[in-house]
Structure formats: C-alpha cells, structure tokens
C-alpha cells in the first residue's frame, strides 16, 4: 500500500493550506516537512525534486506534485471531490477560482505597505460581501441542497469553508447577512475529517503574526514590491 502523502512547505498557510484542507476533508492522513529557514529551503531545492524550485510540493503516489492548482485537482479527482461529469467540473472550477481570488488577496494582505493596509482591508471585505459571498449564498438558496454542487461534497465546498473562516478572522460577524452560508458553515464543520481538522492541535495552520511573516519572507527571499504588484 502506498504511504501517506508528504507535504513540503513552510510552517504556515500560504498556498499549501487549501491542500491541507482538501486532504482533511477526504480524511487522508499526511506528513509534513516544514522549512524554518532559507537554508532549509535551499537545501531542499538542491535535492532536485522541485520542477520549478518552488513549493508547495506534495509527494504522493510516486509523484512529486507541484503547482498548487495541479496538486488540488489531483487530490480532488482522486478522492471524488471533483464532480461527476464535465459540467460539474466546470462549475466547481468557476466556484474555486473565485474563492482563490479572494483567498489570494487575504494571503497577500499582510504584505501590504503600512499606509495601504486599511485601504486593502476595506477592498477585501467589500469584495467578499459584494462580489463573492452573494454568489455562494444564492447558489445554496436557489437549489436548497446541502452543498454547492447538490448533495455531494466537492472541492468547492472545502475551499468555501476555508475562505469563510479566513474572512471571519478579518471581520467577525461578516456572515450575518448570509444565512445560507451560516447554515453551510455549521453543517460542513461537522463532517468528520473537517471537524478533526478544526480541533486545536491539528495540522491546520494559524494566521501568521508579524514576526512569523518576517520569517517567511526570509525563507523565500520575498521582495515586498514584487508581492505588491500582484495585490491590485
Ligand atoms: O501555485 C503555485 O504553486 C505556484 N504558481 C507558485 C508557487 C510559489 O510562488 N511558491 C513560493 C513560495 S510562497 N508561495 O507559496 C516559492 O517557492 N518561492 C521560492 C522561489 O524561488 O520562487
């Protein structure tokens, strides 16, 4: 039998957290190798397994998977979280890509320049409440089923609960205008794999504080201006 998947990343959410969520939802156990320093990461690059000298990387089923979307698609397909036909897959992709747009803004927010922090926060919250959440609220309301794609849990649902919780960290109570999303969150939080993942001490990563953020920038030698170009 194949061993557990092994995840290679730093000790934070970043682009790996959605992978952790998806594996948790599929009730798949995994191991992690977490880089603490730039040297850890450089040594890992030298092992020559990274296609683009970039992480996230997931070692599973005899492959060294990179590129977060490719990793997520593989896991979603393997564990039956990617719809039953081409049309469902297209719909899941449309939902997931919107959620990733929102997720990316939140992921990059801590890199904001101090003088732009408030403006960026207002922008994220406005996009969440005016553009993205209404889509998922309406979908759940219109078909009256448990999940975005009917009654079968999919990758889109897992991505949705992840991003809901991230937005709630920025502004508690933000779901008050979205009763269907509140119901959805309560229901999905009780699914066994997800319930376990939400318990303290799980492999779920917490929001980075200022110091941890500085450490991450050093690991990947992140240039602030480069990040900000992607924030618009
Ligand atoms: O989605 C993806 O996995 C890729 N399109 C981007 C991966 C990426 O930017 N990885 C960064 C780590 S911070 N983000 O997750 C990385 O490995 N940077 C080191 C480098 O030399 O580019």
Image: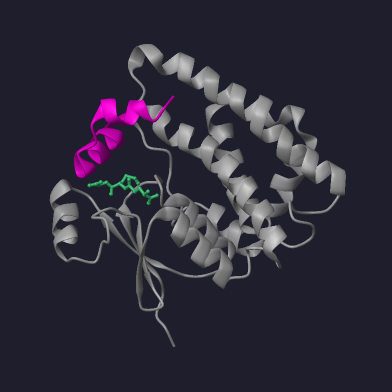
Q: Which residues are magenta?
A: 210-232
Q: How was this image coloured?
A: one colour
Q: Is residue 172 visible?
A: no
Q: Is residue 144 visible?
A: yes
* Quadrant in which residue 163 is drawn: top right
Please give left or right for residue 34 compared with residue 30 in the image: left
- Where residue 225 sits: x, y (%)? 27, 25
- Where residue 222 sits: x, y (%)? 24, 36
Q: Residue at x 79, y 60 (%)?
A: 151
* Quadrant in which residue 43 is drawn: bottom left
Please give left or right for residue 116 compared with residue 22 in the image: left
- Where residue 99 sits: x, y (%)? 58, 41
Q: Residue at x 75, y 33 (%)?
A: 178
Is 145 magenta? The answer is no
Is 214 magenta? The answer is yes
Please give left or right for residue 52 compared with residue 99 in the image: left
């Amino acid at each position: 039998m194949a061993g557990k998947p092994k995840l290679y990343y730093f000790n934070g959410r970043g682009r790996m957290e959605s992978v952790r969520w998806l594996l948790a939802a599929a009730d798949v156990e995994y191991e992690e190798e977490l880089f603490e320093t730039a040297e850890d990461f450089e040594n890992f690059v030298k092992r020559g397994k990274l296609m683009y000298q970039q992480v996230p990387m997931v070692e599973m089923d005899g492959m060294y998977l990179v590129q977060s979307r490719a990793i997520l698609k593989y896991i979603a397909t393997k564990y039956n979280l990617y719809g039953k036909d081409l049309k469902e897959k297209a719909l899941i992709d449309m939902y997931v890509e919107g959620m990733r747009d929102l997720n990316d803004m939140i992921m990059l927010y801590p890199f904001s320049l101090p003088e732009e922090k408030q403006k960026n926060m207002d922008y994220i919250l406005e996009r969440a409440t005016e553009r993205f959440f209404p889509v998922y609220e309406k979908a759940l309301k219109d078909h009256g089923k448990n999940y975005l794609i009917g009654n079968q849990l999919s990758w889109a649902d897992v991505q949705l609960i992840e991003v809901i919780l991230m937005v709630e960290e920025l502004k508690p109570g933000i779901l008050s205008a979205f009763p269907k999303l509140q119901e959805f969150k309560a229901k999905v939080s009780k699914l066994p794999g997800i319930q376990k993942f939400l318990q303290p001490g799980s492999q779920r990563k917490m929001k980075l504080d200022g110091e941890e953020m500085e450490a991450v920038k050093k690991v990947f030698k992140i240039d602030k201006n480069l990040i900000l170009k992607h924030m618009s």
